[in-house]
Image: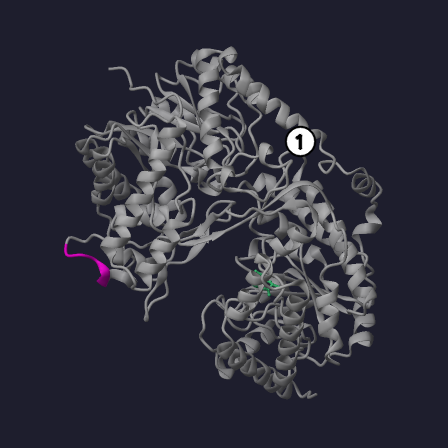
Amino acid sequence: MPKPTFPAVSILGYPRIGPNRELKKALESHWAQRTDEAALHAAARELQNSDLAKLTELGLDPTDASLPGDFAYYDQVLDATVALSALPTRFADLAETNGTIDTAASFILARGDESRAPLEMTKWFDTNYHYLVPEIGETSPIKANALPLVESFKSHAAKGHTIRPVLVGPISYLLLAKAEDRAAVGFDPLDRIDEVVDAYAQILVSLAAAGAPWVQLDEPALVTDRGAALAVPGALAQAVYTKLAAATQRPAILVTTGYGTAGDSARPGATAGLLARAGIEAVHVDLVRGAIPQAGFLGDLAGSTLVGGIVDSRNIWRNDLSASLALLTSLGAEVDKAGGTLAVGTATSLQHVPHDVALESNLPAHLPEWLAFANQKVAEAIILAKGINEGAAVIAAELSAAESAISRRTGFSGTTVARVRERLGNLTTVDFRRADAGIRKDAQEQALALPPLPTTTIGSFPQTTEVRAARAAHRSGTLDEAAYEGFLKEEIARVVALQEKLGLDVLVHGEAERNDMVQYFAENFDGFSETENGWVQSYGSRATRPSILWGDVTRPAAFTVPWITHAASLTDKPLKGMLTGPVTILAWSFIRDDVPLALSANQVALALRDEIADLQEAGIGIIQVDEPALRELLPLRAADQSAYLNWAVDSFRLARSGAADSTQIHTHLCYSEFGEIIEAIDALDADVTSIEAARSRMEVTEDLTSYGYSRGIGPGVYDIHSPRVPSTQEISELIGIALGSLDPKALWINPDCGLKTRGYAETEASLANLVEAAAAARANLGVSV
Ligand code: MET
Ligand SMILES: [Zn+2]
């Protein structure tokens, strides 16, 4: 029997939060017990219906499974945990009598309860989306629960939408999981693949019985080093998909491999051929981040469809339709030769981009025509499918519109700024280097005269309702410039007085003027713009609004200096100036696709370098350049990592190398495990590095010491992610652990991260304990101040 052909055009997934963040509102009011579960389901269903109606209106066929059924209340990996009833042992009591996980239980997995921490959250591949990490042990249950998928399919079918249920695939699910704490040493979640595959096979049968013609299994983990090794001939992926393909009575299967190149990167396309020969009907390749399948590697596609993920779903730029059409045409010829059919799709789910450019009314005039958010991208995929199937002439108007928009983008005055390019061109190695650490240390000791084990914070203080209200009022024009400035100055004075009262050694201004540590910089640099409604899901009900970097970066004027010098004028203690580093600014913005990222990083670095010079000039002797996202952009394949780390580290060094020997440069890292990139952290050559460490009980301190890191280090002594106040005793213990491997002269005492999400009550109590624990540690060392 010939295999069914996949629709000529589809998308892998669509933003789930709603154009007006409807899902956020529905979830949060349910969690706050303002609405019951039925109301939540109704609101979610209404949002899904309107999203599907929108996709249909844009031109996806509602009857042939072109519409992705990728809805998730919280997270797609959590939904796979639900589909497998894979309750971690520590949550075993949440199981229904038939072993399944219901909606209420899934929210406890996601958010924890009084007695249990939630599932760990971690970044989804190299994106800013966070998924809930499955915890799998030798005996944790694995039992198919197709009901939520079946019900969703049926209810949409009843409304005329034949969706294609989407599920994280079995290999990726287990590769994204971690072993339960209680599992035996050496146990690997992948040990349970056979049971997981059996459960998937049962889910497929249930979906077929419900009438689903297609199902989508996402296998992005096949693009990582570990997964890639499983996606070559004779390895696990072949066995798993041969087994699933052999399931009787199942929907046709699309396997997707977004975020890079699946399998052997020297043989792009080979994994698609392998899965097709295993009996899978459609295989997707990422043509944006992954390598283009080359002649010969696809081998025999055995009548399958290759879905070419040509529309970038990680970024917001309008597609260069002519280039895409050319690429698809030549790929189509290869696919044809290999005995397959080419269809058009997106590189990954569109969950990483906002809904619609049409929702923006405040962008600078030149920008909208350069952009494509999710809805525009759907239209682009449809146009490209038309182009390859009916010929370029049919889409001539769209090709030429895209071409002229792109040529206006290239020619726009801010896209390439000669003086910025010239300044970059004139850089030499000297611009990336400071004097030896030892020389700097002596100069700083003289200039700053800090006590041993200096205490400090990471920068932000609680962003109270009043702070947010004042910012909103300023934004909307009801609070004028002078009144807003007055408000912020008072807020800074309060924060400085509080730190003096607490007895902290190095003070900060508190960051009340910043809505967000990246957006604030984007607003003050030229080359960036902010959206009004460009929300992208970060995790659960949370969304961020990344700025858009569209041009060469310049700094019209000093902008942090007034706030920081105001703070400094109110105290005799040293005041630490606070900046966000180049990598983090880029990681949390939409970046350019017309220049290398390293070039943008150095442009941001130069803008920061000028700000640092101005801060120093204004008498600020300590400056922190935060790089919490340094680990996040690390490429998925080891072979690509050192090139990234080189430019990332260089951009940091460029930003701070204008500082005098006596100016103490700090950096701050958080949000992930940094063990893997210790060498790069050392290469940043900051005078002091504060780093998240409390939850891992100072693990990183030892890693750093054994690497030979010898400059200042502030491993966080308390976790700021919850309102819990750490006792003095607890903090003392962590300080003790740090002192076990560190030179006391190098140790700083600080929390894990900024305090902006905390309230004042717990902040004051926690910092008081921190100061007390530091004093006790000094006394133990036989020093006092
Ligand atoms: C995510 S890192 C945050 C650093 C920033 N300076 C703050 O204290 O909020
Ligand atoms: Zn942080």
The quarter in which the C terminus is drawn is: bottom right
- What residue sits right under mark 1 in the picture? 409
Q: Percent position (x, y) of residue 275?
A: 37, 26
Q: Quadrant of residue 206?
A: top left
**Amino acid at circle 1:** Arg
Q: Residue at x 32, y 19 (%)?
A: 5
Query: Which colour scheme appears in the figure?
Result: one colour
Q: How many marks?
A: 1
Q: Is residue 421 left or right of residue 634?
A: right
**Label 1 SS:** helix
Image vertical order of residue 573 relative to residue 215, above or below: below
Q: Percent position (x, y) of residue 650?
A: 72, 49
Image vertical order of residue 392 relative to residue 404, above or below: above
The residue closer to the viewer here, 223 or 250, is 250
Q: Residue at x 43, y 56 (%)?
A: 121
Image vertical order of residue 68 relative to residue 383, above or below: below
Q: Is residue 282 left or right of residue 480?
A: left
The quarter in which the N terminus is drawn is: top left
Inspect this view and state whether residue 677 appears. Answer: yes
Q: Percent position (x, y) of residue 2?
A: 27, 15
Instruction: State the extent of the magenta-drawn residues as a range.
Output: 93-97
